[in-house]
Image (cartoon, rainbow, N blue to C red):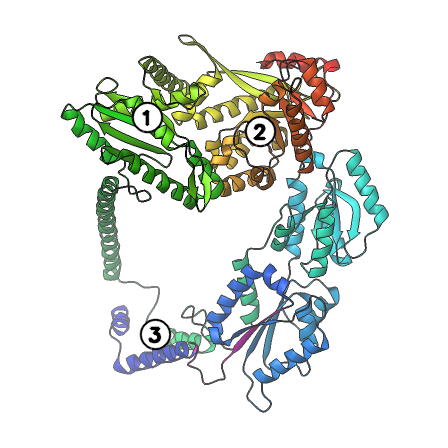
Amino acid sequence: MATKGRWRLAMTIEPRRLARMAMASCLMFVACWQAVPGQAAEPPANAMIVVPSQLALQSDAPLLADLRERLASRVGEANVTLEILGDDRFPTSTMLHRWRETMAHRQPVGSEASEEYVVLMHDAAVRAYRGLEPPMKNAHAVAYGVRDSALREWLKDNRIPHVALDTYAERSLHWALGARRAEAGPLALWYVDDARRDTLVASVRRQGETASLSDTWLPLAGPDQDAVAQFTARRQQQGQPRQAFLSAPVTRVNLRRVQALAAEGWQFWCYQREWLRHGCLGGIFPEPDAMAGALESQLFSSAATPLSLEGLFASSPPSVLYSAREWIRGDARNDVSWLEVPESVIAQRHWRWLAFGLAAGALLIGGLIGWLAWRREALRQRRRLAMRNDQVTDLPGRFLLERRLQNFMEDAYAVSLYYLAFDSLRHLRAQFGVEYANVAAQCVAERLRGTCGGVCYPARLSDDVFVVMASGAQDPMALAQRYQEDFDTPIEVHGVPHRLEPRIGVAISPEHGKTPTALLQAAQDAADQVLASAGTEPQFFQLDMLKTAERRRILAETLADALEEESPFFELYLQPQYRLAKRELVGAEALIRWHHPALGTISPGEFIPVAEASHQIVPLDEKVFDAMLAWLSHNIMWPKEGMANGRSLVWAINLSIRHFDDMRFTDWLLARCKKYGIAPQSIELEVTEHVATQDLGQVRQVMRTLRLHGFGLVLDDFGAGYTSLRFLKELPFTKVKLDKVYVDSIADDERSQLLVKGITDLARGLGLTVVAEGIETQEQLDILRGLGCPIGQGYLLGRPGPVDDFLYRLADKRAVTMVSSSR
């Protein structure tokens, strides 16, 4: 009975106690209400960010944006100001006087001082704050990125929090020592402050990385020129770049000094994001949002009254809220035992859990129904979009074209189809952007409409492909020739003329196809035949093209089956690469051969385009990578006794441009290298000039990630296609491989020699290495050596052969002298 009585008191509270609990709740609500900005009677709080200069403002722009947003949420947008001192060094008396007047205006004499929250960015701001007389009233300050030891002691003595960048500097240095290639040599150190230098060096010694850090420690203000000369001489003697870690703030003086060093050939690793704009290779940088949060936390941690209501108990004064909560709990504890729970309450909780489960199930079913409805609407929307005209050219799309073709074929009309592929549109899109290419596509559509004259039906299948459907008894090839001549006249895009020559394929029904899909495929095969014929004339579909198309289809199906097998279906070949000056082996290029039991030997020139067209090139490349890395781990990385060491050789593997569409490719490749124990520095990835047709921004991001991990990048078939020098400047290639067409005519054509000499000198100036392929005669080798071409490959130096044959080449120590690869 006593227990029941206690529960009766707990469940049916007396009016007196209910009034006291309501009073406590009101007290809690008032405390929370007072915490909202603008409700307190005290003077409004102000926040100020003090920046040394415009350069510092630019350097810390992301951090300052996040910090200003956080301060505005605390004190209001109108109460946040940004003060720029205007000098990188200690501010002049004029600047200090102006700041004092600003402070006097913010805190007039005789007025009640408001709360002031000040963020001091870097050394100059701390010096100016220390020089204020009289000091600011009710000021709460926090410092960021202070390097001077005396200023740090002053901050400590005045109990001003300081958010330093020391951790990022040390982590960035350790990361740079590990991310660099081993053959790049030790890393020098350029610094500004002696104390920071000693801290960094001590950190390296604790981690046992002293071998990677040179003993050349150079002050940025006045370096020892003898030490600089000795370091430069050692690097030049060993063929290594001059690289150093930069421990210096971003100031105008330091910027001029670093730019002068970069002009002399120095390369830097850093820990401040702004240096990336001035040639820094990389580093570990603080996240602006996290750093802004740290500054905000330090600035407002000691505040007596919080300035924002982020949570009921977290940001309100605890002296009021916690006392009210404990009062309620203490009063109830006199009549209720908190450990005794009636069975009815337990049963009620069980029903609550059951109700919760039913509600969750209903929510899941409702979500599934909603998703199905959304998917159905998306399919309808996609169908509606397919039935619309092309948004750029206002021409019909594939859906409308196939429907028109089907209607004409059902009515037994003779239909001729003209497939126009504009490869130059893809090049314009890669070089000048999507909008520029869209304007050119609109000009193409207008010209097609004018040529048709109302008797044809033009359509646009994709970005670079247009199709014209014509009915009647006109001569198909005569009309195709008319289209060809019509596009001989250049098209002007924003006043710039461009000659867009299409590849035209012609097919007619019902001879070449009785369905829209078959007729389109026949016209496309005819357009592809233009490339095979090495001409520009329109091609009429021939019956023997069916055999070619059928063989491609069989190859695609056979390749798909072969890729599903675990073991490689191809044989791995290697072609050696030599340093031409001393005939030294420096690496090899990986090639593949396919010996099919039914189809015979299939050359890469035949099945690689099939893999590209059937979207199987990515799994094929991955299988080649796996096979090559597995062979290296078993035969080269751990050579047998008596065999020359292959660890210093560089192994080139061809890479499809489709990998640049997947940002996860780098992670996959690193995982494979780690699995087989292969250093990324020993792998080079060869890409063709077709990389110019991809999204340059994404290509640059993937390539930079690969380079940061140590992979070499080679531009294959340079000079054979449409590579712009812009790509050599913006993409981080390490080598360029001359196309064979230059080497074939180099012995008889003086212009070819001049071109090879110019490309070699240009590449050397950009820090790239030139590789000549297709060397077949001694005369070609001698000329290339005289022109300064460093590396070459070809039948004269070594034919492609199975990997086992290459092992014999490594075993012959007289035929190979191990050298480091020049990147």
Looking at the figure, which quarter contains the C terminus?
top right
Q: Disc 2 and disc 1: Cα gap in Å?
A: 34 Å
- Tell me which corner region of the image, top left, top right, bottom left or bottom right, holds residue 166: bottom right
Q: Mark 2 points at which residue?
A: 718
Q: Which amino acid type is marked by label 3?
A: Ala
Above or below: residue 305 compared with residue 594: below
Q: Locate residue 244, reporting x and y percent.
A: 72, 46
In the image, taking residue 435 as reference, residue 691 lies left or right, namely right
Magenta highlight: main SS: loop
In the image, taking residue 193 as reference, residue 773 lies left or right, namely left
Q: Name the residue under label 3.
A: 332
Q: Nearer the viewer, residue 377 or 773?
A: 773
Query: Of tags 3 and 2, which is closer to the observer?
Result: 2
Q: Which amino acid type is marked by label 1?
A: Ala
Query: Which label sits on residue 480?
Result: 1
Q: Locate residue 286, reporting x and y percent.
A: 58, 55
Q: Which of 431 and 143 is in front in this view?
A: 431
Above or below: residue 631 compared with residue 136: above
Above or below: residue 488 compared with residue 567: below
Q: What stretch is highlighted in magenta?
A: 35-51
Query: Of tags 1 and 3, which is closer to the observer?
Result: 1
Residue lying furthest bottom: 110
Query: Of tags 2 and 1, which is closer to the observer?
Result: 1
Disc 3 residue crowd, few under 14, some 14–19, many 20+, Cα 10 Å: some
Q: Nearer the viewer, residue 202 or 276?
A: 276
Mark 3 vs mark 2: which is more N-terminal? Answer: 3
Q: Which of 334 and 442 is in front in this view?
A: 442
